[in-house]
Amino acid sequence: MKQNVVLGFVFLAALSFDTELFSQDRAIETVVPFLTIAPDSRAGGMGDAGVATAPDIYSNHWNPAKFAFIDGNSGVGISYSPWLRNLVPDINIAYLAGYKRLDSKQVISASLLYSSLGLVQFTDEFGTTQRTFTPNEFAMDAAYSRLLTDNLSAGVAFRFIYSNLTGGYFAGGVATKAGTSFAADISSYYHKDITLFSKDALLSFGVNFSNIGSKMYYSDSQTADFIPMNMRLGTSATINLDSYNKITATIDLNKLLVPTPPIYSSTKPDSIISGKNPNVAVPVAIFQSFFDAPGGLKEELHEITYSYGVEYWYNNEFAIRGGYFHENETKGNRKYFTAGAGFRLKIFTLDFSYLMPLVQNHPLARTLRFSLSFDISALRNANKSQV
């Protein structure tokens, strides 16, 4: 009997992206794409930009090096994102993060990103249900960041990735298994006080090489697939308009560090007529990803996605955000505006975001996402003041 595990291997692995991403011949495909999803509502409201913005509780995902500049001694945050809620009621992504300052220069942090893909029915060739299973994926991080100078920091994160899409079910007589991978992030963050338009300002730069790790197998006989190794570069500028008002503008550039699919001969399927062999080791794939596109430099530039964001704060208590995300038509064609807001008290911060797709339906279209974070050190100080 043929079990319906194509859904498990292909559709579920790619569910975090729009299906058009995989209909493009030149689109880059990876497993566990949930690793590239903005897990928090602050960055989600700014077009998924976050590598160079001011540090917050969710910096582990965007740039662990930012933690070295974070205010406070400890904190914890949780974020929840319903996924494809207009079609399926039980798909979601949750994110839990926290940090602890060791001293004035060092910070450790950890996070858990969990994705549930909902209840799936496995059927035989006649459509008879054989079993049900809830596919799930998660990534656990531990990170360390340190100040190198008064303006520069560096960070490193280590990640364990787990992806169970079929629950060990058989596909065409072949036993499947959960995929696992180990990966690391290497990041840096720089900021400097400057003057813009006769106002005090802060200029920041960030870089994060994320998910640099091993390929993933879903069966002993399957060819291994790349996880979404990624290079994120960005800058932001924050202008203090006066003692109550400030505004930030930011931009992120992203490029996957995995091979571009080559063009194969129509008569000899194993013969590459343009591009390079994608079945290479991870170190080779990273360097090859900058020059392996069949379309040359033009196609390489098309593989860069752009995130633009703006954030306005009033008295560090209320924020309004907006953003835009752009991906080339031949690489997935994701284009959408985002909006969001935030409320900050002494102890906690509440953020939410909303996504508005431009050219196609998006899994988060017309869906509100929420993030809640707590400043543990501020909570302890508040408790002490009441004693």
Image (cartoon, rainbow, N blue to C red):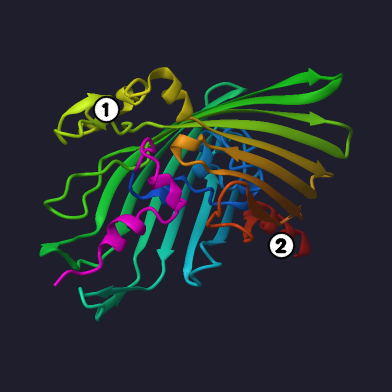
Identify the residue at image location x=53%, y=43%.
Answer: 334
Tell me what residue is drawn at x 57 percent, y 55 percent. Answer: 76
Residue 49 seen from this side: no
Q: Amino acid at mark 2?
A: Asn
Any mark on residue 182, and which? Answer: none
Residue 21 position in % (x across, y down): 43, 45
Badge 2: few (under 14), some or many (20 or more) residues near its Cα, within 10 Å?
few
Does residue 365 show up magenta in the picture?
A: no
Find residue 283 and name its label.
Answer: 1
Which amino acid, mark 1?
A: Pro
Main SS, magenta residues: loop
Residue 215 x, y percent position in the rendering: 25, 42
- Can you identify the residue that label 2 sits on? 383
Q: Closer to us: mark 2 or mark 1?
A: 1
Q: Is residue 321 above or below residue 260?
A: below
Looking at the rendering, the stretch of residues picked out in magenta corresponds to 1-29
- Left or right placement of residue 5 versus residue 192 in this view: left
Which residue is outermost to the front?
Answer: 267
Give residue 291's position: percent from left, percent from top.
Answer: 35, 20
